């Protein structure tokens, strides 16, 4: 960690740990913004309760909208409100472990970067993880955040039980056997049912992964993607616009000892692509020739480490993102069309597209509900206007039956979601029964649920 990041971490840690529950008072609204800076608000109250009881009291007594906030890694407007924002960061850590059942209960505010070492101390590991580990566990499951693996579900698909504080301050518990409808709704609840306080995860024995990264031509990957997803425990790939080249990631369980080799620096690599864009913007053909030819000279590299260390990547170059989850059988056709749209109309784009594979699951609002899926994510540098490109590629995603990632940018409304999710009305009924006054709904969610804003 460099000195600047250390200072930021120390300041944030002091803020969280020094506040005596709800005794911290604001003299004026304290602005909030997400990681990329595209979502902002000035809530009248920003609370960091130190116990479930304090959280219950806060929710019970609050007027106006109450929204939970994780680590701010959602690009959609799930959080913004000018009323009350609640962080569960002090409701963190490991509270119980069952070695026989391979389950563990963790506080909602536990960062994914903390989950791995906590479970590893008890010889357990998450079955799968996303590649950004700075999210809170509650925020990740509430938006169906996922890693990659043709036979593996999102984080939400491995939840075995939840506790949440409802609008009336009551602490509710749910699982597949206790309040099962609430459980299926709350597995991907968008913070609209209540504020999650703890999560019980189905895990597996701790294990090591070997990552092997290699370069391939776009056409080769399109042809081989499904075969590679079947032959690897985890497979994903990144297409770099205007290069014709793809970086593949193949992760497989191994008994080899930990071995860390020098990896491609994704952050400096992205900025190198920006430099190539800026320098060669006058000729996309020359840009593809030079950058694509360079990529072909980069050799294969590999690393072995604990699973949680292999999954995670640092993302220090900020961006905005649109990600859709498409039926596996049509995803490669959709990707080729997205490439065509971008490269014909947006020569300034340099951020890679990311493609991952996710197995079907049963959470009502999971984008992977009863559907094996390939996710396709497109990005724009945070200083650039993302709207024109996203507006151009979203119709392609929708044409192929895609469901948007709940934490990523999209323009869908209630009628669209109702068509995409077979249990949409069931979810709305559960939400209405728990929060008829809409305490947990901000304008974005009201619009998504078809309610007056």
Image: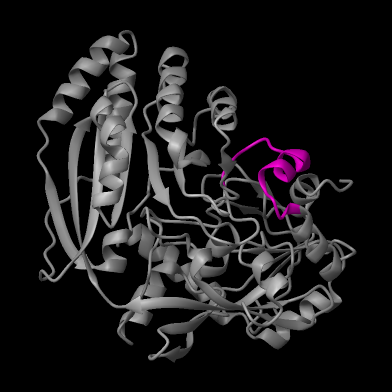
Q: Nearer the viewer, residue 14 or 65?
A: 65
Q: Nearer the viewer, residue 212 or 107?
A: 212
Q: At 24% across and 11% down in the image, what residue appears? A: 286
Question: Based on the displayed image, in which of its 4 quarters is residue 282 positioned?
Answer: top left
Where is residue 421 shown, x and y percent of the image? Answer: 67, 49
Q: At 53% across and 62% down in the image, what residue appears? A: 140
Where is residue 309 shown, x and y percent of the image? Answer: 28, 65
Where is residue 291 shown, x and y percent of the image? Answer: 21, 23
Q: Nearer the viewer, residue 101 or 41?
A: 101
Q: Is residue 2 visible?
A: no
Question: Based on the displayed image, in which of its 4 quarters is residue 412 positioned?
Answer: top right
Q: At 9% across and 39% down in the image, what residue appears? A: 299
Q: Is residue 63 visible?
A: yes
Q: Provide the residue span drawn in magenta.
A: 408-424
Was residue 412 drawn as part of the magenta stretch in this picture?
A: yes
| Quadrant of the drawing holding the N terminus | bottom left
Was residue 417 drawn as part of the magenta stretch in this picture?
A: yes
Where is residue 205 shown, x and y percent of the image? Answer: 31, 79
- Say if 354 sits above or below 100 in the image: above
């Amino acid at each position: 960690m460099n000195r600047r990041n250390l200072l930021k971490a120390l300041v944030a840690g002091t803020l969280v740990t020094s506040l005596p529950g709800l005794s911290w008072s604001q003299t004026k609204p304290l602005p909030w913004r997400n990681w990329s800076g595209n979502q902002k608000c000035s809530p009248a109250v920003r609370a960091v309760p130190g116990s479930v009881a304090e959280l219950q009291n806060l929710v019970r007594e609050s007027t106006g909208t109450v929204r939970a906030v994780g680590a701010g890694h959602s690009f959609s407007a799930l959080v913004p409100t000018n009323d009350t924002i609640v962080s569960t960061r002090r409701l963190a850590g490991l509270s119980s472990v069952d070695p026989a059942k391979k389950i563990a209960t963790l506080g909602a505010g536990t960062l994914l970067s903390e989950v791995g070492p906590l479970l590893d101390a008890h010889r357990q590991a998450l079955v799968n993880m996303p590649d950004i580990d700075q999210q809170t566990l509650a925020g990740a499951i509430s938006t169906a955040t996922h890693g990659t693996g043709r036979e593996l579900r999102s984080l939400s698909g491995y939840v075995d039980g939840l506790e949440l504080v409802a609008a009336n301050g009551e602490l509710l518990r749910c699982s597949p056997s206790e309040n099962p409808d609430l459980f299926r709704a709350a597995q991907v609840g968008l913070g609209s049912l209540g504020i999650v306080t703890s999560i019980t995860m189905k895990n597996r024995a701790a294990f090591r992964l070997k990552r092997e990264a290699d370069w391939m031509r776009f056409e080769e990957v399109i042809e081989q993607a499904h075969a590679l997803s079947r032959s690897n425990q985890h497979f994903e790939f990144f297409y770099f616009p205007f290069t014709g080249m793809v970086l593949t990631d193949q992760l497989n369980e191994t008994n080899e000892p930990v071995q860390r080799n020098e990896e491609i620096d994704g952050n400096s690599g992205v900025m190198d692509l920006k430099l190539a864009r800026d320098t060669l913007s006058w000729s996309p053909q020359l840009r593809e020739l030079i950058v694509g030819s360079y990529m072909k000279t980069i050799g294969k590299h590999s690393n072995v480490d604990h699973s949680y260390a292999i999954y995670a990547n640092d993302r220090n170059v900020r961006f905005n993102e649109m990600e859709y989850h498409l039926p596996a059988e049509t995803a490669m056709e959709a990707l080729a069309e997205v490439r065509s749209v971008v490269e014909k109309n947006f020569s300034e784009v340099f951020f890679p597209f990311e493609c991952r594979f996710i197995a079907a699951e049963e959470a009502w609002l999971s984008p992977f509900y009863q559907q094996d899926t390939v996710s396709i994510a497109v990005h724009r540098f945070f200083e650039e206007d993302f709207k024109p490109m996203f507006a151009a590629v979203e119709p392609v995603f929708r044409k192929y039956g895609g469901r948007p990632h709940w934490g990523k940018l999209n323009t869908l409304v209630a009628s669209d979601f109702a068509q995409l999710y077979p249990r949409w009305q069931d979810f709305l009924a559960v939400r209405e029964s728990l929060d008829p006054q809409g305490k947990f709904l901000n304008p974005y969610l009201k619009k998504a649920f078809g309610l007056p804003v």
